[in-house]
Image (tube, rainbow, N blue to C red):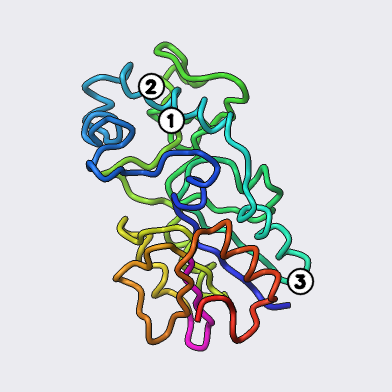
Amino acid sequence: MKTVVALTGAGISAESGLKTFRGADGLWEGHRVEDVACPPAWARDPARVLRFYNERRQAVRAAQPNAAHKALVDLEQGYAVWIVTQNVDDLHERAGSRNVLHLHGEIMLARSTATPSFTKHLGDADIALGDTCPEGSQLRPHIVWFGEEVPVMQEAAEIVSRADIFLCVGTSLQVYPANSLIFATRRGTRRIVINPDVPDLVPRDVCECIATTACEGVPKLVQHSFCKSPVCS
């Protein structure tokens, strides 16, 4: 059975109503990254950071998986499928994908500030100041902030290196080190990029480019079973 690895970004979740990572004004939902998404922000004003992520978590709970998420699940009927996502939402899991690796963490989890290996699924709850792990350390969002290492990056590169078909869906490829994964594929891997605006980083001599949304492009590609002339040309 062939292996398909899909690297997914904010574009696939945007079609479920979740705001993309950065808007045209360079802000994240009206906030500067420096105020809500880095260790200094957490040290300076943890209540503000928790409030920001609690609001984002509510938006995730209200969102539903879309046609692109569901098409990637359908793909599991004929392929071994891995999802490597830059998104922190749980839409892939709720759609039914079985193998999902989150590069930048998971918003539905909390983790210990002092012991990163301790994580807790939040369910319907949020995180407040005073919520602690069993060792007494404040809980924080299980998110990889700017200035922090991506702990699963090596695992992601190994997964991508096993791909027979590599899909790059809804990502601008602007965030390092996730954007390097497109170059982690082995020789002979079929590379397909689905994005309304194909990023300049994409090596077009070795990638097939489908300039459309995830909800349009992924279901069509799955329906055509990766034929040699997909809807991209």
Q: Which residue is mark 1?
A: 141
Q: Quadrant of the N terminus?
A: bottom right
Q: Residues within 10 Å of mark 3 (few under 14, many from 20)?
A: few
Q: Nearer the viewer, residue 145 or 66?
A: 66
* Whole-percent x, y for residue 182 in the image: 41, 71
Amino acid type indicated by mark 3: Gly
Q: Earlier in the sequence, mark 2 or mark 1?
A: 2
Q: Which residue is mark 3?
A: 78
Rendering quarter of residue 3: bottom right
Which portion, as a residue range, is magenta? Answer: 186-194
Disc 3 secondary structure class: loop
Asked if labels 1 and 2 touch by Cβ distance under 8 angstroms, the answer is: yes
Amino acid type indicated by mark 1: Pro
146 with respect to 58 (left or right): left
The residue lying at 61 percent from left, 86 percent from top is 228
The residue lying at 22 percent from left, 41 percent from top is 25
Cα distance between the residues tagged 3 and 2? 41 Å
The residue lying at 50 percent from left, 78 percent from top is 191
Up-down: is 47 above or below 164? above
Q: Which residue is mark 2?
A: 50
Asked if labels 2 and 3 touch by Cβ distance under 8 angstroms, the answer is: no
Asked if labels 1 and 3 touch by Cβ distance under 8 angstroms, the answer is: no
